[in-house]
Amino acid sequence: MNWLSSIGSAVEFLFNRTGLYALMLLELLRKLGKPPWYGRQLLLQAEEVGVQSLPVVMLTALFTGMVLALQSYIVFHRFAAESLTGLVVSMSLVRELGPVLVGLMVAGRVGASFAAELGTMRVTEQIDALWTLSTDPFRYLVTPRVLAVILMLPLLTVIADFIGIYGGYAISVFLLDQNPTVYIENTTVYMGLEDFYSGLVKACFFGLLIGVIGCTEGFNCKGGAAGVGTATTRAVVISCMSILVSDYFLTAWLFG
Amino acid sequence: MNDTTNNDLPRISIRGLSKSFGDNVVLDGVDLDIMPDKSTTVIGMSGTGKSVLIKCILGLLKPDAGEILVDGENWLTLSENEHLKRMRRIGMLFQGAALFDSLKVWENVSFALLRQDVSKKEAKERAIEVLALVGLHDIAELMPAELSGGMAKRVGLARTICHKPDIVFFDEPTTGLDPIMSDVINHLILRLHKNSGTTMLSITHDLKSAEMISDHIALLCHGRIHRIVPANELRSDKDPMLRQFVEGRAQGPFNCSHWGINIEEAIDR
């Protein structure tokens, strides 16, 4: 009956984590409306999440756009529809790949950092020390981090969208000899603002997931160095899984 | 902030404080009075709930039952914001100092001041002044990772007293330090107590430290305060449990069976 016990443990774990994340979210909403807000912490976190993530996000977007252009061109070439390459690259990036890839990159970089940093602060009593210095640890540590990632993810997504589209343009025009005017026209004519906005809505939601999951795992960390390791791994794995699963439901809701 | 200064009433009065973790009853009706301007130390074996007691008083853990009265006000009924405001009169030195890794030494020391209406310049000057009090000079710009254990503890002590609290808690202030650094920390705590008349509650295993920094010493055993004695009578007291603890004997009335240790058998082997 080991398999039954494993299923039971998995279900218990799922409910346990969902409950913890929901409580964290409720606490965040409860404390968001009242001061103190710690604006400097928010700026520091925005720099950490936004500026520091730029290189990895830009590189990922550039090569994704390039690969997408190459693959689309090969397929469209079979039925002489190469001019649609630009449209496919831009639509895929703006509606889907931009927010998802940025979300996954930031989950790996920032979600892990939130969990490790807060987890270490928990096991070394730094979070308790904040309380004894008349500072609410939640407002000082969690709120700025979650807000920063919610605000920065759409910005990173916009940058990733443009760089990805440029990567596709560069491959199509300079390597595959496509007409640049046709490429740009096909990209802009068929793409509406709603395509762009839907990507940003997804990015905001993914930001919320990364922030809440990373901070919950770190804030509730137990058990010394091993506990910090477990919290960090959980933060990354659960964030990535949540992004991919929620992406389907968001797409169904936004375009359904 | 309540500025009651009646020296006949306890500054902190703990009544029937209980705390369990699952089936493990850690505190089982603790009663303890800490008088104003006095230094009290709670001693006891590892795992008897000394740290839990301090965490309950500070609001870091929620007790299952009991009252914690500070100048007559029950802190357990305070809202979170009210509790945080009361913490301005509290200082706490953690066992591992608990310095904030991402902040410079002076920012750590003046952390509480920077959260109040004190300018950055004034806060830094006060931090440097308090660091000098604990014998640390020219380290204000260092990061905590650059400090030795003894220095970190002294920076922690500086942070504890920087905002001039009137109640200070010490969690194992000398644990992990060499005898000379322990003596330095004890003298600093003693000086703080004598100069500012701060009410203090410490928990420690270090009996030398307890005798040096305390007016009274309380023995926590089986979840309750078993005995309180004046610090200078610690070694002459006849209580069998206190004697066993002071003499550091494995055999005696302390029940070690709940750790699965059969003392007689262990000694025979």
Image: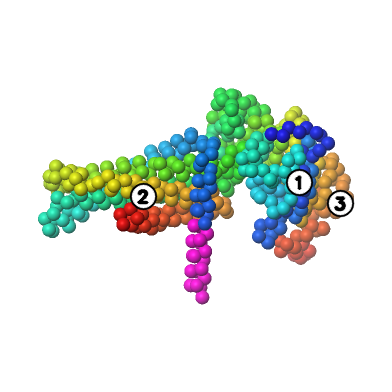
Q: Is residue A193 left or right of residue B151?
A: left
Tag 2: Cα neighbours inside 10 Å, few (<14), some, or many (≥20)?
A: many
Q: CA distance from mark 3 to mark 2?
A: 68 Å
- As shown in the figure, which amino acid type bears the numbered disc 2? Lys
Pick whichever of labels 3 and 1 is earlier in the sequence: 1
Question: Label 3 lies in what chain?
Answer: B
Q: Is residue A5 magenta?
A: yes
Q: Are marks 3 and 2 in contact (CB under 8 Å)?
A: no
**Majority SS type along the magenta span:** helix
Q: Secondary structure at mark 1?
A: strand
Q: Is residue B209 above or below residue B28?
A: above
Q: Secondary structure at mark 3?
A: loop
- As shown in the figure, which amino acid type bears the numbered disc 1? Ile
Q: Position of residue A34 (x, y in %)?
A: 53, 39
Q: Is residue A129 left or right of residue A12?
A: right
Look at 86% across and 51% down and name the residue there: B239
Q: State the residue position of label 2.
A: A202
Q: State the residue position of label 3.
A: B239
- Identity of the residue furthest to the left in this view: A80
Q: Is residue B134 above or below residue A153?
A: above
Residue A61 visible in this rendered orientation of the protein:
no
Look at 54% across and 41% down and name the residue there: A139
Between disc 3 and disc 2, the foreground one is: 2
Question: Label 1 lies in what chain?
Answer: B
Q: Which residues are magenta?
A: A1-18
Label tally: 3
Q: CA distance from mark 3 to mark 1?
A: 23 Å
Q: State the residue position of label 1.
A: B14
Look at 31% across and 57% down and name the residue there: A256
Q: Position of residue B157 (x, y in %)?
A: 66, 35
Between disc 3 and disc 1, the foreground one is: 1
Q: Secondary structure at mark 2?
A: helix
